[in-house]
Amino acid sequence: MSKRNQFKQPAGKQPPTRKSTAAHTADAPALARYGWIGLLAAALGGLLYANTIGHQYCLDDYSVIMDNWVVKGGLKNIGTIFSTEYRYGAWNSPGSLYRPLTLTMLALEYGLAPEKPWLSHLMNIVFYALTGGMLWLTLRRMLADYTPLLPALATLLFMAHPAHTEVVANIKSRDEIVALLLSITALYSIFKYFDHRKAAWLALAVLLYGLSLFTKESVITFLAIFPLSIWFFTNKSLSENLKVSALFLAPAALYLIVRHRVLEAQAFPEVYSILDNFIIGAKNSSEKLASAFLMCGRYLWTLVFPHPLISDLGYPQMKPVGFGDWRAILGFLVYVGMGVWALMNLSKKHFLAYAILFYLAAFSLFSNVLMTIGTSYGERLLYGPSLGFAMALAWGLLRLAKVDFKSQDLSSGGKASLALGAGAVILALYSIKTITRNPAWYDSYSLYLADIDRSPNCAKLNYHIALEEAKRGQDEKTSAVTDRALVEKAIAHYTKAIELYPEYHDAFGSRGLAYFRLQNYDKAFDDYQTALKYRPNDARVLSNLGFIYFMRQQIPQAEEVYRKAIAADPRFIDARRNLGAVLAMRKDFDAAIEQWKEGLKYEPENPTLNFYIGSAYKDSGRPELAQPWLDKASKLDPALK
């Protein structure tokens, strides 16, 4: 036995012999022998998240769906979806994301079931279940030389891992689910091409990978995963490997070119906030790197021991550290150690080396080591990398049980039973954690309530729970306060957020609005002014400030700030509605109508704007023009009849 093969296999077992492509083709019935495992994986994925179908919109679902006029407009906005940044329809700020296929799916679903999130939750579950079945097919084919216990355990452990709750329970993370599903299906197609030598399989792989990129950009890392997989699990020469792998550069280049052209059309690049990524606050590159490795360690620990799970670990709950912090040193040593060991065993085609390299490649873009991204922590970012972890864990269980890695029988005696028993215990614990974590994702308020005690000094988490408390303390349509105690509780959370981050302009602006709802106009005015000191062009704060001027009969000042709000965000409908009202008061009806019609470009089914336009035509002596607008307004909202 060669030294290479001795290292690869446990307990002196003979390694599986690499088969030729023809042999793999002949073994197709054998590969299909345990197809029920794929069905089991799909069923497991569906059952674990069945309790999320009745959930509401939560967290980023608002910026991607409910507050996104492009997505809410359905497929008629598909041109805008493909020509603008990911959150273009939610706010007039530059972004760095381009995921048009994800938004297209969500737009279609919203068109079929407006403001009914059950359909999108159901589709998340369906795509996740499909991932389970497809993952089994891919790993079973890729690991054809290994015992089917290895891909079976890896698939089931992946499907049950609790770190996936944010991905499946939060509609927004459809991008994660579908991007990985398409990428692993592309990987499967590559191996089918090697089996049958039919170009159609290779063309399908390239197409699927291209679609995955337009779903979420992070699957660009599969440009490394594809050749790694071919190297580890086939006998293809390096030259053939590179020829096949190079084909995937074409869809990647296409995506990057389109993405660049879309993003460069923005007025200025996105600027990340310390509230989203505390690493931005690092004083120097050494501190930035240390902080990144600290969080790398935290991510890995979440995979190893997924409790407690949390939606936000932002500033100043987490602060930049140097390499004097033991956590940063440990994270650095663990990741560098894993990478060095895997590379040392690359030539030996050691399975654990593949699992480690898969994890490191898939996680690389989220690590903040290679580049700084818009967040320092998010469990959704572990979705793809967790597949590498699941493969490593499955290998470890089989290795400890001294299972024969070349046996093609699931029931290979007591050793297999030991591995399956340990795997079953882990699966049970994972499943319990997943099912019990899902209710936290029912809506934004339940999520923040579940997490605030786990991250009490996160300024952003305090701010967001305050938003939910304020929303629940007032009538949704009239904005009148219905629960004063709850609004005051929101003010307390806004105040804590400000104490944690004194330049938190959003918290000042939102606290000002809460004071306004409580009719404490002087405090509201002061908070608005402070918010504008830190962000002078905040359209929402400017519009809210204008309303106070309006109430004080300071009409010129109200008009001034409304115009500033529109200049800052031309798509801000509230500011246009209010400016139109000011202009109508001055009998400048045509100018008022112009503002309201501009607002209808972004929200054509807005009943108030239609009603205002009809009223303005009527008040200006043009009743023949007024009636169609008034009729449409009453149709959209019978209360306006």
Image (tube, rainbow, N blue to C red):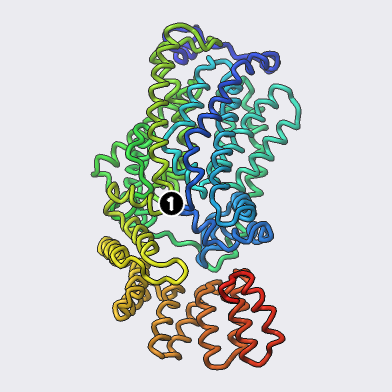
Does residue 47 sit above or below 483 in this rendering?
above
Residue beneath label 1, please?
443
Q: Is residue 599 left or right of residue 550?
A: right
Q: Quadrant of the C terminus?
A: bottom right
Q: Measured from the top left, where is residue 224 in percent x and y? A: 55, 36
Which residue is rendered at x = 38% and y = 54% of the image?
A: 445
Q: Nearer the viewer, residue 152 or 300?
A: 152
Q: Is residue 426 visible?
A: yes
Disc 1: CA contacts within 10 A as few (<14), some (14-19) or many (>=20): some
> Where 459 falls versus 533 (above or below)?
above
Q: Quadrant of residue 16?
A: top right
- Residue 632: which quarter of the image? bottom right
Residue 155, above or below 111: above
Q: Amino acid at mark 1?
A: Asp
Seen at 51% across and 87% down, the residue is 582
Q: Which is more toward the observer, 60 or 84? A: 60
